[in-house]
Amino acid sequence: MTIRAFFAILLCKLLRFASRVLHRGGTAMPGRFALKLCPDLLDLLACQVKTVTITGTNGKTTSARMIEEAFAEQGLSYLANRSGANLIDGITTEFVMNSTLFGKVKKDYAVIECDEAAARKVFPRLKPRVVVVTNLFRDQLDRYGEVTHTLENIREALKGAPEALLCLNADCSLTASLADDLPNKVRWFGIEKGAAPSREKPEISDATHCIRCKTEYEYDYISYGHLGGFRCPKCGYRRHKADYAVVDIVEQRPDGSDIVMEVGGEKQLVTVNLPAMYNIYNAAGAVAAVSEMGLGVKAAVDALAKFHCGFGRMETFDLAGGTRMMLVKNPAGCNQVIEYLQTMKEKFVLVICLNDRAADGRDISWIWDADFEGLRALAGRLDQVIVSGDRAEDMRVRIKYAGVDDSFIRVERDYETLVRSLEQETRPVCMMPTYTAMLELRQTVIRHCGGEEFWN
Amino acid sequence: MYPDVLNLYGDRGNVMCMQKRLEWRGIENTVTRLPIGSKANLADFDLVFIGGGQDFEQQVLLEDLHRGKDREILSAVEDGLPFLTICGGYQMMGNYYETYDGVRCDFIGAVDLYTIGSKQRMIGNYKYQCGPESGGSIVVGFENHSGQTFLGEGVQPLGKVLAGFGNNGQDGTEGVRYHNLFGTYSHGPLLPKNPALCDHILLTALRRKYGTAELAPLDDAAELAAHDEMAAKL
């Protein structure tokens, strides 16, 4: 422990304390200054704990919370970051806040969600035991560039963590290619053929051509987006059989799913206490990670049944006739949410909040790749669409061209007015905010009807 | 054309928009997807849309183009077939693309323009005013390109940049208008928020097909609200 590290930790703790007193949630700034003072601070702290890291385009936060739930159920002492703090600065702050002034980390484990663009800086320092890569979808071109760039970022990052065991999504042809030319041990998770009805090939796929030889893929089945049983007819690159395999999807409900998972030849029924197909993938990845961290499959399965994500990911609130908030940020995730809406049995109100700030992506054209046309199938159940956020008018146009009558669409920019009007509502409400819209909308909802603060 | 690879961020919104605006006026239309490897006679169509793509698939695309489609597109453009081409699709209509480190890719050469890769990305919301031959409307959009496009002598731009970068961030031009080909960097859903430009392109196609044509006005309250909101910010 160097004197430099001591002062960096002290500074970080003071800054964090100050930002809390001032009621600023910021977790990045303290870590940023600490790293300036002591560039290897994160390495010094992270080497003391056993870390599991989660990265990928969609599902990082939910997967991390699932893993965390299993750790908590097992009574392990662990630290974890929050999605707003998934760059190197925020992760450093989290480690510092869980260590003594003299640099001794007070926990045994760490569950760290890591932004895919930040992974190159973070992985070599964290030296994680297990890395989960959830999937790779096209996301915020202005921030990340093309999806293959993100993939190469993660590949580079993993070169700095050769000891890590990788839990990879077997059904994602982009993610699966990480197993090539890396020395790491790999475990696969995925949904097997026949577990769910195969879908039609989507009009927009994020990975149509073979990542190795650029020949168009053929599919045995598609679970959603470009995920499924892919194979390249030319070079033979194809899906691996999953070690953590979803072999049957027994039931999908508005509030959760029952699935059968097969691990090491043993099948078991798993209840995932969160709805929608993409959470079945998140659950499978979490089971893989928890098991490979040495806790066993049962620990993960038990946790999934009790799990609540919060943080705007399928989070429920006691507002109107019941409110569910579902973060959307790119076409693949948005399509999954629109599909989830199809499970609504009664009349409901839909709120869509579209922002175009840095963390959302400045470019909102992705809303035209998302299949809002799916809303048409809800005619009779969907009574009103309220659009909000900085780009509410663009969302209004998108919904109009998706086939929703413009007279059903209400533009309401002010969250306070919006939430207040929903208090009079007896029907259930589904909210689809982008990231920064979610932070604000969630604050407003919590002020009115309670809920957990982001930074606890 | 090439919806399988040239579909970067919302490009299909333009096709959806044109379809709807025709449907709302009772004009029947069909959309045909021409992916890589498809064989179709361009003369059978009334309007061709080509969007932007990722670098990853570019090589596959160029191989397909150079198997004869480039000549077919070139003669269709000369023949006055309306094209709306965006970002990568727009660059492709030019003579070539030269990367920052000097590697040159030959394109279709349907329009006398070329593109040079630069280190700086030109990115953000922007607006431009179309020339009178393209309807004269003010267009708002989002550009995201590192290629700087330069028009040949006497080649008309689609419009004049009012805010943002446009073709190259230097000469104030944006896009191209050549015969009935419209090219622009406004990627993603250009048309939904710019109904005047959409209708102008549709009219161009209808007049070529039927000689004369008019489009009944639509209630564009939502479209214009989105347009005006962004136009006011820039």
Image (cartoon, rainbow, N blue to C red):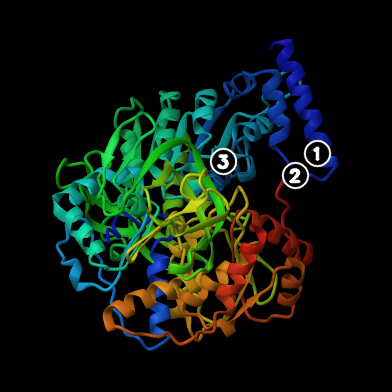
Q: Is residue A60 above or below residue A371?
A: above
Other residues around mark 3 within 10 Å, as few (<14) / some (14–19) / many (≥20):
many
Question: Circle 2 — which element?
Answer: loop
Mark 3 to mark 1 CA distance (whole Å): 29 Å
Q: Which mark is residue A71?
A: 3
What amino acid is found at the position of numbered circle 2 in the picture? Gly
Residue indicated by mark 1: A19
Q: Nearer the viewer, mark 3 or mark 1?
A: 1
Which chain does the numbered disc 1 sit on?
Answer: A
Does A147 appear above or below B157? Answer: above
The residue sitting at 41% across, 67% down in the picture is B14
Residue at the image position 22 percent from the left and 57 percent from the top: B74
Image quadrant in which you'd find residue B198: bottom left
Of the residues under marks 3 and 1, which one precedes in the sequence?
Answer: 1
x and y percent of residue B48 in the render?
A: 29, 66
As helix, strand or loop, the secondary structure at mark 1 comes to: helix
Question: Are labels 3 and 1 assigned to the same chain?
Answer: yes
Query: Farthest residue in the top direction?
Result: A2
Q: Which residue is mark 2?
A: A25
Q: Are the residues tagged 1 and 2 within 8 Å (C-beta)?
A: yes
